[in-house]
Image: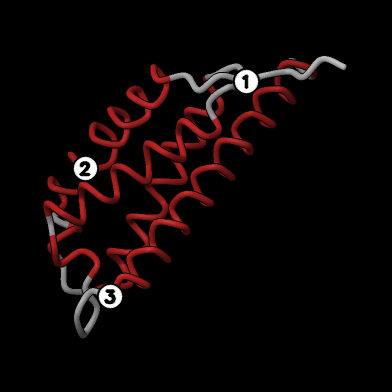
Amino acid sequence: MAHSHVQFDWRWLGIGFCFLVVFHLLPSFLIGVLTVRNELMMYLWLFSGFSLVSGYIGYRTQGESLLESAFASTIYLMLLSYALPGILKTKGEITVVFVLIGIACVFVISAMSVYVGNVLRRKQQTNPE
């Protein structure tokens, strides 16, 4: 019984991280959404950015970037929360549980977005218009 072994592609981890920096961090600073005091708007921008960038990566790849993009988004969130400590603060202090929940949410959202991007690409390839 042969097992299919999928290797982790470090190239897509780097590409995903660079995409997040270019297509999420730079626009965030340009429009100032990360420094805005409206927490709901900031969190919507963060999670929609992870979803859109990960979905695009899933659309462009051949289906091998599910974990790579999720890890890139997780690393990006951790570095972003270190560089901008107020990003994970609500009204009180940052707790470990809150950070872990944020990391888990970003990982799941990114993985699901890559999957959706893969499905859309396959659907477009089978039904070209």
- Residue bearing the label numbered 3: 95
Residue sitting at x 42%, y 21%: 12
Q: Judge whether 67 appears above or below 101 on screen.
A: above
Q: Residues within 10 Å of mark 1 (few under 14, many from 20)?
A: few
Looking at the picture, which amino acid does disc 1 mark? Val
Which image quarter holds the C terminus?
top right
Residue sitting at x 45%, y 34%: 69
Label annotation for residue 6 = 1
In primary-sequence order, the first of circles 3 and 1 is 1
Q: Residues within 10 Å of mark 2 (few under 14, many from 20)?
A: some
How many numbered callouts? 3
Secondary element type, mark 2 = helix
Residue sitting at x 71%, y 22%: 122
Cα distance in 3D space between marks 3 and 1: 35 Å
Q: Position of residue 54 (x, y in %)?
A: 46, 37
Looking at the picture, which amino acid does disc 3 mark? Thr
Q: Are marks 3 and 1 in contact (CB under 8 Å)?
A: no
- Residue bearing the label numbered 2: 25
Cα distance in 3D space between marks 1 and 2: 30 Å
In primary-sequence order, the first of circles 1 and 2 is 1
Q: Are marks 3 and 2 in contact (CB under 8 Å)?
A: no
As drawn, the residue found furthest toward the front would be: 1
Q: Position of residue 68 (x, y in %)?
A: 46, 30
- Which image quarter: residue 120? top right
